[in-house]
Image (cartoon, coloured by chain):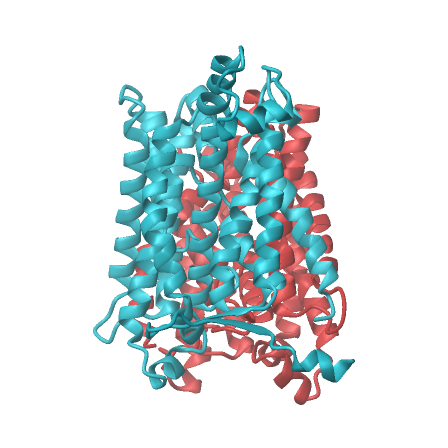
Chain colours: A cyan, B red
Amino acid sequence: MAAEKQLRPSWITIRPRGLNFSYKLDRRVPLVALGIIAFTLVVLVVSINYGQYNMSVGDVVQTLLGLNRDHPDYRNFTLVVHTFRLPRIVLAFLVGMALAVSGTIMQGITRNALADPYLLGVSSGAGLAAVALIVWLKDVPAYVLPWAAFAGALITAVAIYALAWKGEGSSPIRLILVGIALEAVLASVTTIMLLFGQINDVQQAYVWLTGSVYGRNWEHVYAIGGWLLVFLPAAILMARQLNTLGLGDATAKGLGLRIEWQRGLLLIISVALAAAAVAVAGTIGFVGLVAPHVTRRLVGPSHEGLVPISALFGGALLVLADLIGRWVIAPSELPIGIVTAMIGAPYFMYLLYRSRNR
Amino acid sequence: MTAQTQTVTPSSRILGSRSLLLPGLFVCLLLLIGCLLWSITLGAADIDSTVVYESLFHYDTTNFDHLIIQTVRLPRVLSGMIVGASLAVSGAIMQGLTRNPLADSGILGINSGAAFAVVLAVFLLGTPSLSTYAVFGFIGAAVAAVIVYTLGSMGRGGATPLKLTLAGVILSAFLSSFTTAILIGDQETLDKIRFWTAGSLAGREMPLLLQTAPYMIAGIVGALLISRQLTTISLGEDIAKGLGQSTGWVKGIAALLVVLLSGGAVALAGPIGFVGLVIPHVVRFIVGVDYRWILPYSAVLGAILITVADVGARVVIRPQELPVGVMMAFVGAPFFIWLARWKVKR
């Protein structure tokens, strides 16, 4: 039995004919992917079904697929589904994907288990910009907020990278140390605004800092969707370089990787995804840090499987968190950023317990 | 991926020769005393340094300046110093234990545990006084640390760095989510608590200092006693075991010391970040990897950083003041960035 088990290959290799390219996946990847997708679809339907306006599960599915156009209530159905409920759920999924992939890349590059999408200051930069707008410059129109957050995130990331750059290149450890310092400064400025701002604005700022998808519409979905369309495939294609970088700079160099170039590209992907997510949904924590760890326990440490599966896991987690956040203290709702940790943490503790002897 | 990653090993330390280490520590101590005196002279009313000297050594209860110094300024400066020393030492211990440059005492869930307990207490009891904050803060910190350590040491191999780190991150996120839920839901609690959560030394008086200081002093002394073992364990579990160290014991005691140090600090001054994270790195740049030197230097430099930051916090927007936790980054970050650029070669 045991010998037979060993003979089965533990990898799936995808090698398109005629292309100089191959992709090697852990054998568990397809099953785990199907599991997560099925789970997400179920939660999606339940989530759309849940709310003030009552409709049956069958109606939800039919409306989603556009099969019940002749139903007398179709106009109501499609308003509720497509205008009110679906956008925020889709947005939650996309944001979860972006943060999870971003975190996976960051942990891969720095070889640090504590790294997350915000290691290069994305959250402190975006947070500073957003809190300044909410607490301090109150008469700026609302549509400016995502752009300001996005700009704050990118500027901070570039500043940290530039400060950590020296003649011979960047180094993960210098990035980490400079990141700590610059983030502390920005966070301090943010704290000052939170300390002396009016309490109503401060509360609103807290909600943004926690992360929320309340009241988001298709515009937000398209905004982050565009970024994902470019950078998610890029991340998957570069997964293999992440494996090599994980061996350490010296080894990666020895294996012929142009490390500065590859690391720079990966950092751009990671920061772009994180900044896009933060711009539309605020600084949601936890998912970017934990999704890679959870996924590693599900499909092993190789990044070819890790990147896509962590994306799915992050998306699923946020969709579930959104549903629970709307349900738990209805008719009012808990911001998605809070619920993510409330449900994600116990699950991860369970995983930690189950794999305690490894 | 393992957490056996880079603890920062500087390619060359600033005090290259071992014979410079002891004099260097003395210089730092003198600098600390200087900061202490300087800090006492500054405030809502500036007090002359000769008066400060007299009030310390020939205390005259009828003199108003002496009274201010003895009841307000001295306790505050001493609080800052002990808090800074404790946080820096516990940060150094955690970085050694988890072998992670991003670690500080927050990794054991101490700050989030304390914040959760304090916010919950204010929310339910509505009695904001610094001593209630202290009691709840310490209890919250200790309970969180015990949970994290238990979770992190399940299974074979005990408390490995990765398991400990992950358990800490998870519990911190879990507790913080409830803290935030309360703060978002209840404006009154948010208003009462927001200054405390930034970490502040304002209004810390002698009785509170005397209640919390013993824990922190015990923690510092204990840390110095096991500094040799900490050096060994910071080289990695395998090496420590190979050298014949009983790593389980050392890790347990170190975690206990961190609870005393950071729990005491958070009880006295609220959750203060930065110092515990950054000072150990600075110290490693100066003295290298030997914890027998890292710990005393961390204590002294941590105390200096908070003292200077507190002066800044008090004078920068006089007559109001900023929390010291906020000021610290402004004071420390530029120097730290410069140091990281200069000393980290790889």
Residue at the outermost right position: A1
- Camera-side residue of B58 and B250: B250
User: Where's the C terminus of chain B, which quadrant?
Assistant: bottom left
Residue at the outermost left position: A167
Locate residue B39 relative to residue A265 in the image: left or right. right
Residue A152, given in percent of the width and then of the height, sits at: 29, 42
Locate residue B260 relative to residue B304 in the image: left or right. right
Q: Does A129 sit above or below residue A20?
A: above
Kindly identify the residue that appears in the image at 46 percent across and 62 percent down: A107
Residue A316, given in percent of the width and then of the height, sits at: 56, 44
User: Where's the N terminus of chain B, which quadrant?
Assistant: bottom right
Q: Does B140 sit above or below residue B297?
A: above
Kindly identify the residue that appears in the image at 41 percent across and 76 percent down: A244
Residue B340, given in percent of the width and then of the height, sits at: 33, 67
Q: Quadrant of residue B278?
A: bottom left
- Camera-side residue of A140 and B292: A140
Say whether residue B26 is visible: yes
Residue at the outermost bottom position: B243
- Camera-side residue of B119 and B268: B119
Q: Report the number of discs.
A: 0
Residue A197, given in percent of the width and then of the height, sits at: 39, 25
Q: Does B296 sit above or below residue A206?
A: below
Kindly identify the residue that appears in the image at 47 percent across and 33 percent down: B64
Residue at the outermost front position: A70
Locate residue B110 relative to residue A90 in the image: left or right. right
Say whether residue B51 is visible: no
Q: Does B340 sit above or below residue B324?
A: below
